[in-house]
Image (tube, helix red, strand yellow):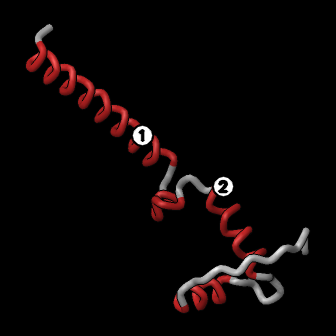
């Protein structure tokens, strides 16, 4: 689908161009490809976690619990250090 078509020239490295070309569907323009990649990036908060996509809810819940527990411990340690340095 072609929308209001203005053109901008951008420079990209050859290796990036080749990678984009591999990702592009046969009937897809580079603009459509980039638009699709941006949309997918914004929709997938776990994309940087790789394997996390395939983990069970039980494992993800345990991960979340451990992170929250770690944050609480960090807060307690920070408060203790603050008291140690600055007094009550």
User: Taking 13 as reference, is 77 left or right?
Assistant: left
Residue tagged 2: 43
> Mark 2 or mark 1, which is nearer to you?
2
Q: Residues within 10 Å of mark 2 (few under 14, many from 20)?
A: few
Location of the N terminus (image quadrant):
bottom right
Q: Quadrant of residue 6?
A: bottom right
Q: Residue at x 24, y 29 (%)?
A: 73
The x, y position of residue 76, in whole percent, is: 22, 23
Q: Secondary structure at mark 2?
A: helix
Location of the C terminus (image quadrant):
top left
Q: Secondary structure at mark 1?
A: helix
User: Taking 5 as reference, is 43 left or right?
Assistant: left
Q: Quadrant of residue 22?
A: bottom right
Q: CA distance from mark 2 to mark 1?
A: 20 Å
Q: Residues within 10 Å of mark 1 (few under 14, many from 20)?
A: few
Q: Residue at x 9, y 20 (%)?
A: 85
Task: From the viewer's side, name the closer residue of 72 and 54.
Answer: 72
Looking at the image, is 35 positioned above or below residue 15?
above
Looking at the image, is 16 positioned above or below residue 41?
below
Task: From the viewer's side, name the closer residue of 22 and 62.
Answer: 22
The x, y position of residue 52, in whole percent, is: 47, 57
- Per the rendering, the mark at residue 64 is 1
Looking at the image, is 3 positioned above or below residue 42?
below
Task: From the viewer's side, name the closer residue of 47 and 37.
Answer: 37
Whichever of callouts 2 and 1 sits on the residue coming sooner in the sequence is 2
Looking at the image, is 24 positioned above or below residue 78?
below
Task: From the viewer's side, name the closer residue of 70 and 82.
Answer: 82
Q: Quadrant of residue 16?
A: bottom right
The x, y position of residue 37, in whole percent, is: 67, 69
Q: Residue at x 60, y 88 (%)?
A: 17
Q: Residue at x 65, y 83 (%)?
A: 23
């Amino acid at each position: 689908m072609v929308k209001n078509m203005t053109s901008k020239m951008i420079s990209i490295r050859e290796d990036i161009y080749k990678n984009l070309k591999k990702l592009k569907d046969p009937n897809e323009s580079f603009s459509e490809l980039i638009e699709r990649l941006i949309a997918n990036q914004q929709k997938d908060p776990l994309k940087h976690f790789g394997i996390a996509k395939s983990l069970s809810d039980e494992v993800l819940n345990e991960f979340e619990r451990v992170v929250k527990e770690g944050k609480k411990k960090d807060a307690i340690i920070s408060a203790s250090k603050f008291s140690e340095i600055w007094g009550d």
